[in-house]
Structures are given as C-alpha cells and as structure tokens.
Image: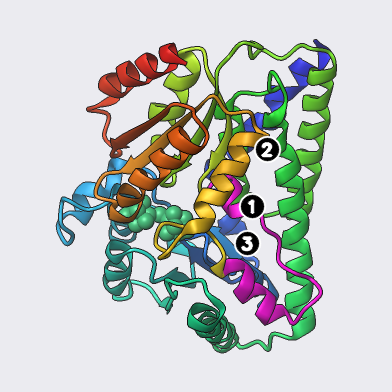
C-alpha cells in the first residue's frame, strides 16, 4: 500500500498543471521566450520548438466565456469553438494573453470561420488542412503548409530554423509520446491500476507542463508506481469493473460530466480514442526521413472526423477495443459538431456489428443543465454491460 500513497502527489502535479502553468508561462515570457498558442492536434508543434518558441494549448474548456462569444457567434455552434473565441474576446486565458501568435488549422467549418474573427484580435496563422489523407490529393498540399508555417515562424521570431533543429525537436516530442503511450497503455491491465479520470488528468496536464524533461521524469515515476500497484494487486479498481473506451470529440470541457459518472457507476475508462489520448499519441514522427516530409506525413494521418474519408479512425478504434479488452464504447458528441455527429452511424456499426459490444452516444455541451440526465443514461448503460 506504500506505493498507493505515493500516487496522489504525482497525479496532483498534472491535475493542477493548467493553473500552475499560468505562472510558468508568465515567467517564460518575462525571460524573453516566444509563446505560440495552439488549438488542435494537427499543429506540428515540433516546428514551434525548433523556432525556439514554446507551444501552449489555448483555453477552450469552460462555459464561462461562451456568453461573450455568442455576441459574435451563433448560439447553435460547438461549445469548444465558442469558448475558445470567448477567451480571446474577454482576455481571460493567460495562455492566449501571452501568446505572440496563434497557429490554427482549417478543420471543421465552425472552427475555420471562427479563426477568421480570431485573426482580428491576435496574429493568427492558419494552416490550410486538406481533408483527404491520400498522398497525391492531400499530402503534397499539407507539406507545403508545413513549410509555410516554418517560414511564418522564422519571420515572426526572426530566426532561421535548420533541419537539424527540426530533427532534434522531432526526437524530443517522440520521446514524450513514447512515454505517454507507456503510461496510458497501463489501462490494458486487469484491473487497471488507475481510474480513467486520473488517466485523463495526466494526459490533459501535460499540455500545460513546459519543462518536458521534468515531465518525462514524473511520468516515469508514475509508471513505476502504477506497475508496483499492479504487482501488489492493490488497485482500487475492481477486477469486475466493465471496461469502457471513450471516443468522439475532445472531452476536456465535459470530463466531470462524462468520465466521473461512468466510474461512479462501477465501470472504468481504460482508453481514450480521442485527441486527449490515442488519436494524438499513437503514431510517432519518422526520424529516418526528411523532417518536413516526416511531419507532414505524421500529422495528416491523424484520424479526425474532419477527414473524408476517415477510415483510419475505425482501424484505430477496433485495435483499441481488442487491445484494451473493452466491454462498452461511449461516444461523446459536442453539441453542433456535425463531423463527429455524422460519423456516429459508422462508429456505432463498427462497435456493435464488428466487435459485438454495446455502444452509446452522448451529445452535450459545457453547461451543467443536463448533468443529471447524462448520469441517468450512463448508469443505465453501465448496468447493461
Ligand atoms: S484533430 S478532434 S482537436 S479538429 S468538436 S471544434 S470538430 S465542431 S475539436 Fe478537434 Fe483537431 Fe479534430 Fe482533434 Fe469542430 Fe467538432 Fe467542435 Fe471539434
């Protein structure tokens, strides 16, 4: 049990990372560091590191700034988009405030149109993301966009980015990915040595941890402790807990509303097939080829619903269901997210017909109005597993 006691300290560091990061980002700024705000998993952050700047995820997960955003944006729009824009309008996100520029991508319609407005408030570089991942149709265009981002960073920060610097950044970020994958892969254990909520907090916290060497060291300690918990068979998760995979839209803004009731109902979230989890971290950047080509290939391959077709999402989903011995899939749809919402039909088919396990889709926003209703639906779903 000694090792169980060691855990909260480590986990807490990541739970509090977003708030703690506010101070760190100011210190970095005071020390003359350039800061680049990002919104999406498609941003090749290695280029930002190679420019000597610091990438940071911008705030997008609270309903606090949505009323302000709705003065310019339609009400019937994804809460993530409204919250992101609201933070820029109200200057309530320290990460946005200290960002020298923002990198954004033409992903879904709502986001790309919001970015046009955001560009009136902040220097916003928009990468034109092709929506087809085939080599001839998408990759070449995307590679040109990766190069254009490199040029923008060089001009903005008055630096020259060498191939060596990009390769170094690729290797560093790959190291971080490998370690995070080792961490979340512990969800494969029966029972997992940690809850899905704790896993989410760590994966979310790393976006706001700027000392990556220290982060890697802490993740290594967490992995070691979790393995000891497994060896000692002292996990607080029941061996009988139904194992849940979460898929769909980014979950940061509704983690309390979705993950907590799943686990309070006696199940455990063992893996996340979303941008906070496997979708973002599974694939490494190839370190053996030209770095710009490698970045272009890796980032365009992210299986987000904005891609058409998006067959790789189904491939990843099926693999995760098998590897993590998943008993049920919960899909999160943020209100008015058309791309994920339309894909639910195929995802449900894959889960229920090809893997023969139950599936449930939950559509929600950042408000707390439907908390009770969602809890009831989740409880009914878990009971049936
Ligand atoms: S790579 S998931 S972070 S686009 S939920 S804003 S799609 S309407 S967030 Fe995303 Fe990049 Fe894809 Fe990931 Fe639009 Fe849907 Fe809202 Fe979304």
Considering depth in this image, is 210 or 126 the residue closer to the camera?
A: 126
Q: Residue at coordinates 52% horizontally, 42% vertically from top-left?
A: 19
Which mark is first along the chain, 3 or 1? 3
**Which residue lies most toward the front here?**
353
Tell whether label 2 touches label 1 (CB within 8 Å): yes
**Which image quarter has ligand 1?**
bottom left
Residue 355's x, y, as percent? 52, 34
Of helix, strand and loop, which one carries label 2? Answer: helix
**Rendered image: mark on residue 28:** 3
Question: Is residue 261 toward the left or the right of residue 9 in the image?
Answer: left
The magenta span reads 276-299
Residue mark closest to the camera, 2 vs 3: 2
Of helix, strand and loop, which one carries label 3? Answer: helix
Residue 146's x, y, as percent? 56, 80
**Is residue 15 in view from this perspective?**
no
**Rendered image: mark on residue 184:** 2
Which mark is first along the chain, 3 or 2? 3
Q: Work out how far the residue at label 2 is from the one at label 3, CA to CA, in angstroms.
A: 29 Å
Q: Work out how far the residue at label 1 is from the one at label 3, CA to CA, in angstroms.
A: 26 Å
**Is residue 281 in view from this perspective?**
yes
Considering depth in this image, is 20 or 342 the residue closer to the camera?
A: 342
Q: Is residue 243 above or below residue 367?
A: above
For label 1, the crowd category at 10 Å Cα-Cα, with few meaning under 14, some 14 to 19 and many 20 or more, is: many
Residue 148's x, y, as percent? 53, 86
Q: Residue at coordinates 76% horizontally, 11% vertically from top-left?
A: 234
**Rendered image: mark on residue 281:** 1
Question: Is residue 236 toward the left or the right of residue 127 in the image?
Answer: right
The image quarter in which residue 132 lies: bottom left
Tell whether label 3 touches label 2 (CB within 8 Å): no
């Amino acid at each position: 049990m000694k090792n169980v006691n060691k855990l909260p300290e480590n986990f807490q560091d990541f739970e509090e990372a977003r708030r703690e990061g506010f101070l760190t980002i100011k210190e970095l700024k005071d020390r003359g560091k350039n800061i680049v705000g990002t919104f999406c998993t498609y941003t090749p952050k290695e280029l930002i590191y190679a420019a000597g700047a610091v990438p940071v995820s911008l705030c997008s997960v609270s309903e606090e700034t949505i009323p302000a955003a709705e003065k310019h944006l339609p009400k019937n729009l994804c809460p993530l988009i409204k919250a992101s824009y609201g933070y820029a309008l109200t200057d309530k996100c320290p990460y946005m405030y200290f960002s020298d520029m923002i990198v954004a991508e033409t992903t879904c319609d709502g986001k790309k149109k919001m970015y046009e407005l955001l560009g009136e408030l902040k220097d916003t570089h928009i990468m034109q993301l092709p929506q087809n991942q085939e080599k001839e149709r998408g990759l070449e265009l995307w590679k040109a966009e990766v190069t254009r981002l490199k040029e923008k960073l060089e001009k903005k920060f008055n630096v020259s980015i060498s191939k060596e610097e990009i390769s170094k950044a690729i290797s560093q970020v790959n190291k971080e990915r490998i370690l995070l994958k080792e961490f979340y892969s512990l969800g494969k254990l029966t029972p997992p040595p940690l809850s899905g909520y704790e896993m989410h907090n760590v994966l979310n916290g790393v976006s706001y941890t700027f000392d990556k060497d220290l982060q890697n060291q802490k993740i290594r300690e967490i992995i070691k402790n979790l393995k000891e918990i497994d060896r000692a068979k002292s996990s607080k998760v029941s061996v009988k807990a139904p194992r849940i995979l979460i898929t769909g839209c980014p979950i940061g803004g509704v983690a309390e509303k979705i993950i907590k009731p799943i686990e309070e109902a006696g199940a455990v979230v063992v893996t996340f097939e979303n941008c906070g989890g496997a979708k973002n971290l599974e694939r490494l950047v190839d370190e053996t080829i030209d770095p710009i080509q490698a970045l272009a290939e890796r980032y365009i391959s992210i299986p987000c619903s904005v891609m058409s077709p998006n067959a790789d999402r189904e491939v990843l989903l099926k693999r995760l269901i098998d590897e993590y011995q998943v008993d049920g899939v919960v899909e999160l749809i943020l209100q008015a997210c058309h791309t994920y919402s339309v894909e639910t039909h195929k995802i449900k088919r894959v889960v229920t017909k090809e893997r023969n396990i139950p599936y449930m889709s939950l559509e929600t926003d950042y408000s707390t109005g439907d908390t009770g209703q969602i809890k009831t639906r989740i409880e009914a779903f878990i009971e049936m597993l």
